[in-house]
Every structure is written in structure tokens, then in C-alpha cells.
Amino acid sequence: MRSIDKSNITAVILAGGQSSRMNGEDKGLILLKNKPLISYVVDVVVKKVASILVSANRNIDLYQEFGKVITDELSDFQGPLAGISAAMDKSSTKYLLVLPCDGPFINSELIDRLVLEMERNNGKICVASDGDRMHPTFALINTDLKNDLSKFLDDGNRKLGLWFRNNNAIEVDFSDQIDVFINLNSPEDFKISD
């Protein structure tokens, strides 16, 4: 079993979506309890990785506060795979930790379990699952897959789950912690109580 420590991991926080259900507001920067959503993710991740990238296509200056901002080269909001591909191009570590910007309940155990399963199985992708389905924006990916992902995108594919399945992603069970998958997608979601 090969040990993976924080020096082997770069995080990419996906903040490049259109936020159509948020009336176009940039989700990662919307305040929840007086803090931008993305800051909840950064607060957990910063202790677990060598560096943080933020995949964003707008508000670049604002996102710089949370990590090194990268933009994907594909036009028209091509989805999370484009951001992951751009992050692989910029990453110098063996592993890329992928997380969404709108998950305020992400915790360190999520990261630890993904890393542990990667160590145990020596796989290429470990992805979180709620017991019924995978949550592909919560994953640890071996950056050796960079060329494979580039080809997948060049062929016109955009489905993150399909790319994961094509690469025999190992699903890591988080059915005991499904709150980590709560993301805030609409103005109503921001009315969560303390």
C-alpha cells in the first residue's frame, strides 16, 4: 500500500458553472452566514493538500483570494471535466482532489477516506458515493489520466460520470455521511437554519 500525503495532492475547487438556478449569481461567492460558499471548502482543504486551484470562468480577481485561479480553454461553459482537465495541466502532483465550490458541509473525513481508498486499491479514480449513486464532483484522480481525459474531451464527450466509469472509478461509500453532498443550488437553499 503506497502512502499518499498532502505533498502528493493538488485540490481543484470547481467554480466555473453558470449558476442558472441562482439567477446567474456566482455560487461560490454567495454569502452563507457571512462567508462566501467557497471559503467553507477552502477551510477544510487547505490542511490536506499541497496547493489549491480554483476553476472559474468569471470573477477571477475575487477567486484569487482562495487559490490560484485557472480557466478552462473550452468555450461556452463546457462543464466540470473541462475544469478538471485544465487543473491537470497546471498540477505538478500525482493526485488531483476535485470538490465543488457549493458544498459547505465538506469535511476532512471525506478527503481522508478518498485518500485511504486510493492507497488501498492503487486505483486511478476514487469517487464519493451516497450508497445509491456516485457524486463525481467529490473525487480523487490520478493525474496520469491527463492524456486520457484530453482525448475524451477532444472526442466531444462532456459527461463526468461516463469518464469515471470508463476508467473503472472506485466508488467510496459515504452513506453514513450524506450531508457532505448537500450543495446550495437555489436561493431557497440559502435559507438553511443554524
Image (cartoon, rainbow, N blue to C red):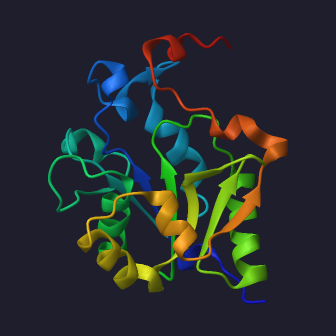
Residue at the farthest bottom position: 1
Query: Where is residue 2 shown, x and y percent of the image?
Result: 72, 89
Query: Where is residue 167 shown, x and y percent of the image?
Result: 55, 77
Is 95 drawn above or below residue 98 in the view shown? below
Q: Is residue 149 visible?
A: yes
Which part of the image, by quadrant, shows the N terminus?
A: bottom right
Query: Where is residue 55 shown, x and y percent of the image?
Result: 32, 53
The residue under the point 34% across, 58% down is 158
Q: Is residue 92 visible?
A: no
Q: Is residue 45 left or right of residue 61?
A: right
Given residues 64 and 78, the one toward you in this image is 78
Given residues 126 and 95, the one toward you in this image is 126
The residue under the point 25% across, 39% down is 62
Given residues 153 and 22, the one toward you in this image is 153
Q: Is residue 121 left or right of residue 24?
A: right
Q: Is residue 105 left or right of residue 43?
A: right
Residue 73: quadrant of the picture: bottom left
The residue under the point 68% across, 14% down is 194
Given residues 156 and 3, the one toward you in this image is 156
